Amino acid sequence: MSNIIEAFNEYLSVVKSLNTHTVESYLSDIYQLQEFAQKNVLDLDTEDILKFLAHFDNKRTLNRKLSSINQFFTFCHAQSLSTQVKPNIPMVKVPKTLPKYLSFDEIVSGMRLIDRQAKSGLRDYALILFLYATGTRVSEALNVQRRDIHEGWVTIRFAKNQKERVVPIAPVALQALEEYLKVAPITSEYIWLNNRDTQLSRISAYKIVKKYLGVSPHVLRHSFASSLIVGGANLKVVQELLGHSSLVTTQIYTHIESKELQKTINTHHPLAKESA
């Protein structure tokens, strides 16, 4: 069984080019299923898998486990290791929730707290603007190197699923970055450095954004996309900028546009203030 899981690992990593975290999650789910069943996973039937899934109350967790199992059985069937394509179990419907995001005014208000006289303050200010201006994932932003910034554009080389993309940087964010780089030591190929002049960690970046804005760095990515959609940007363009492989993933932001339109009507239309 270990050889099959190792082959599955290679398939996910090499053939499907999934990132390390996703691969580890899939493998962990399969190992967890095997430990629960106490027998070869390929010998399990739908009832066995349902018993396993019944232990998870969170719908998103349950769907992720099922997705891992489906991927595994599909792989094994393609390799003629199993006659079962995948368990005949439907995904659980999860209510759609709007991603949390901040308005431009909220971001600016929080950034006023930053002491830009200090080197760390210049970094924090530039980092927050960079995340909001580019919509990059925090892991992508932290891996940006000096050579990746060129004439107002940033090349994202360590993107999810290893798909490189190029994103423009707003002039105000670029200016903040240049001011930070003037005082940042050129001892590392990376841009975002800690007090020891080594690459800033995700935990440190989280603490910086949380300190001034009260949210995680990923909320700035949502704020970037929301600002573009509300401003009338084409959904396909937003998809490219975010690096989404599917337009379906990006479409959640159209709900934000509808929410903003409704808010505008309720605030400004005279009938919204009248009772029937």
Image: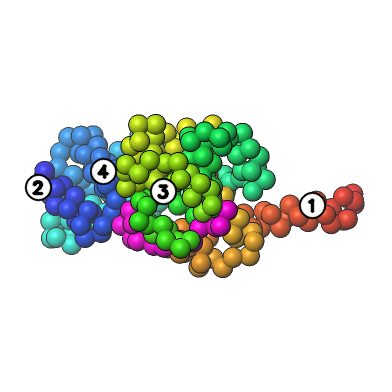
Q: Give the CA distance from mark 1 to mark 3.
A: 38 Å
Q: Toward the viewer: 84 or 33?
A: 33
Which residue is identified by label 3? 141
Q: Residues within 10 Å of mark 3 (few under 14, many from 20)?
A: many
Q: Which mark is residue 24?
A: 4
Q: Residue 134, relative to residue 59: is it above or below?
A: below
Task: Kindly identify the amino acid type of the residue bearing the numbered disc 4.
Answer: Glu
User: Which residue corresponds to the image point at 19% horizontal and 50% vertical from the top-left?
Assistant: 9
In the rendered image, residue 161 lying in the magenta stretch gets the answer yes
Q: CA distance from mark 3 to mark 2?
A: 37 Å
Give me the C-alpha separation between circle 4 and circle 2: 16 Å
**4 or 1: tag closer to the N-terminus:** 4
Q: Which residue is mark 2?
A: 3
Image location of residue 252, percent across then percent down: 54, 56
**Residue 42 image position (x, y, % from top left):** 17, 48
Q: Nearer the viewer, mark 3 or mark 2?
A: 3
Which one is earlier in the sequence, the residue at label 3 or at label 4?
A: 4
**Residue 253 location in percent, x, y?**
56, 56
Residue under numbered circle 1: 266
Q: Nearer the viewer, mark 1 or mark 3?
A: 3
The magenta region covers 157-172
Judge depth for marks 4 and 2 and give the one in front.
Answer: 4
Q: Nearer the viewer's eye, disc 3 or disc 4?
A: 3
Describe the colour scheme in one phrase: rainbow
Q: Is residue 147 left or right of residue 30?
A: right
